[in-house]
Image (spheres, rainbow, N blue to C red):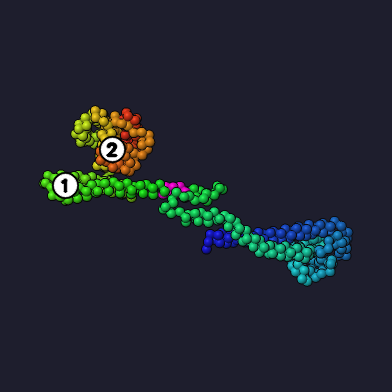
């Protein structure tokens, strides 16, 4: 069943049950009030007759008591009456003339000649003699009123039930109309138009929050799809260049007979370009595994100071070739983190490689590590060309290069890979750059003590 039909059924069922319960409560409550009022009147009149006989009767014979009872009965309203008995239950007087008998001290109901009555029975002692009397009141008018009320309540239930079903249909249709519009809009959205959005209702309710959440999700999907398309296009472009170079070099080598040295030179070029292509493919595979949540990292306790010292010997030959001033400042204390040694080593090499590419000859590069609060901070500072604000927000995008002419054969995957590794270690990378004066890359990693 549709949500609309279920809403109507639930609404109508609850309304029907509530309406029936209301009718029952009203009828029972009204009937109880009528009976209580009648019983109160009977008890009050019985007490009055008891007192009247005691006070007004002069003499001790039954005739005097009967006369006083007759006098009292003249004041009773129509539809009520009394019957007087002696101590043995022999009737002495009845007004009106009825054969009503009973022995209930509390008000009770009975049917006499088809007429519903309420009756109370009392014993009274007058001048040393014991008498009994029964006083009653007809419920015929009250029962007729109760029957009319019952009829009205029974007729009211189906009328209001039909109105409830109709009202539920109208309300559910209005309430679910935005859902139909949202459904139609959602069906029009595909991978090609993820930038489209669902209509957001103006009234602040659950549907508005749902549409806003869906639009936010569509925006994230659109951004992710855009990045995927860009990643695919960039990957194709970056892979096409070395493949084309390898193919062209091989074709040129095979076109005409050449000397052994020429063949060796061609093979060396193919080897170098193949190594570059292998590096690109490995980086792409690692990034793909990272996107899939397969980090492949092995965490262990390691000393950042030792890692910085190891990096010094590896980087020194390259800084010497460019005549760069190279300084390493290991920490004055042991800085322990939980991390993957090889992955963190790759981060530092990527940051240093980036610094060497964009630092001119006679420039300066410094690597240092220190402790800050509950974190370990590793910094790579250079005196290179710096990064402008327009590039600073994109340097961690895949395949993005600030200056391709000075990339030294890179394809723009070093910094994105470094950022992913740092984030996998629950850390972060911050960049401070001053155009023409250099940059500082800071890597923040949680200390081992914080993780414990």
Q: Residue 343: which disc?
A: none
Based on the picture, tell me whether residue 83 belongs to the magenta stretch.
no
Left or right: 262 in relation to 303: left
Q: Secondary structure at mark 2?
A: helix
Q: Residue 193's x, y, as percent? A: 44, 51
At a point 32% along the width and 46% down the height, the residue shown is 234
Q: Residue tagged by mark 1?
A: 267
* Magenta span of residues: 214-221
Left or right: 181 in relation to 139: left
Say few, some or many: other residues with alpha carbon within 10 Å of mark 1 (under 14 / 14 to 19 / 20 or more). some
Above or below, 44 relative to 392: below
Q: Secondary structure at mark 1?
A: helix
Let me know if residue 368 appears in the view: no
At a point 31% along the width and 31% down the height, the residue shown is 385
Quarter of the picture holding the C terminus = top left
Q: Residue 267's x, y, as percent? A: 16, 47
Q: Residue 405: which disc?
A: 2
At a point 80% along the width and 70% down the height, the residue shown is 99
Q: Could you say which quadrant of the image residue 69 lies in?
A: bottom right
Prevalent SS, magenta region: helix
Above or below, 388 relative to 411: above
At a point 16% along the width and 51% down the height, the residue shown is 254
Distance of label 1 from label 2 (alpha carbons): 25 Å
């Amino acid at each position: 069943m549709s949500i609309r039909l279920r809403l109507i059924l639930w609404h109508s069922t609850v309304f029907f049950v509530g309406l029936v319960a209301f009718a029952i409560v009203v009828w029972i409550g009204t009937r109880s009030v009528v009976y209580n009022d009648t019983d109160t009147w009977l008890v009050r009149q019985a007490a009055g007759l008891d007192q009247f006989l005691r006070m007004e009767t002069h003499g001790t014979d039954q005739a005097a008591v009967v006369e006083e009872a007759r006098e009292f009965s003249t004041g009773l309203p129509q539809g009520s009456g009394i019957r007087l008995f002696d101590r043995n239950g022999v009737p002495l007087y009845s007004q009106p003339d009825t054969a009503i008998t009973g022995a209930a001290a509390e008000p009770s109901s009975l049917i006499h000649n088809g007429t519903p009555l309420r009756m109370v029975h009392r014993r009274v002692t007058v001048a040393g003699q014991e008498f009994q009397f029964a006083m009653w009141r007809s419920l015929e008018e009250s029962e007729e009123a109760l029957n009319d009320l019952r009829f009205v309540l029974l007729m009211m239930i189906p009328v209001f039930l039909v109105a409830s079903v109709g009202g539920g249909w109208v309300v559910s249709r209005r309430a679910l109309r935005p859902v139909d519009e949202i459904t139609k809009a959602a069906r029009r959205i595909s991978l090609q138009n993820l930038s489209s959005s669902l209509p957001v209702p103006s009234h602040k309710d659950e549907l508005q929050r749902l549409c806003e959440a869906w639009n936010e999700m569509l925006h994230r999907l659109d951004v992710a799809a855009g990045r995927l398309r860009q990643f695919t296009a960039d990957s194709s472009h970056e892979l096409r260049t070395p493949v084309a170079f390898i193919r062209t070099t091989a074709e040129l080598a095979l076109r005409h007979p050449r000397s052994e040295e020429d063949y060796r030179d061609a093979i060396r070029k193919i080897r170098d370009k193949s190594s570059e292509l292998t590096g690109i493919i490995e980086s792409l595979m690692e990034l793909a595994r990272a996107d899939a949540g397969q980090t492949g990292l092995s965490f262990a306790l390691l000393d950042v100071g030792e890692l910085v010292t190891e990096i010094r010997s590896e980087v020194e030959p390259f800084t010497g070739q460019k005549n760069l001033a190279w300084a390493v400042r290991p920490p004055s204390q042991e800085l322990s983190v939980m991390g993957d040694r090889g992955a963190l080593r790759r981060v530092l090499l990527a940051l240093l490689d980036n610094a060497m590419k964009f630092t001119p000859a006679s420039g300066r590069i410094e690597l240092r590590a220190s402790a800050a609060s509950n974190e370990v901070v590793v910094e790579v500072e250079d005196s290179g060309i710096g990064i402008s604000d327009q590039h600073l927000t994109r340097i961690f995008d895949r395949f993005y290069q600030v200056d391709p002419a000075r990339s030294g054969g890179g394809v723009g995957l070093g910094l994105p890979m470094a950022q992913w590794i740092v984030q996998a270690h629950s850390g972060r990378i911050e960049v401070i750059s001053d155009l023409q004066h250099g940059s500082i890359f800071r890597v923040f990693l949680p200390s081992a003590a914080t993780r414990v």
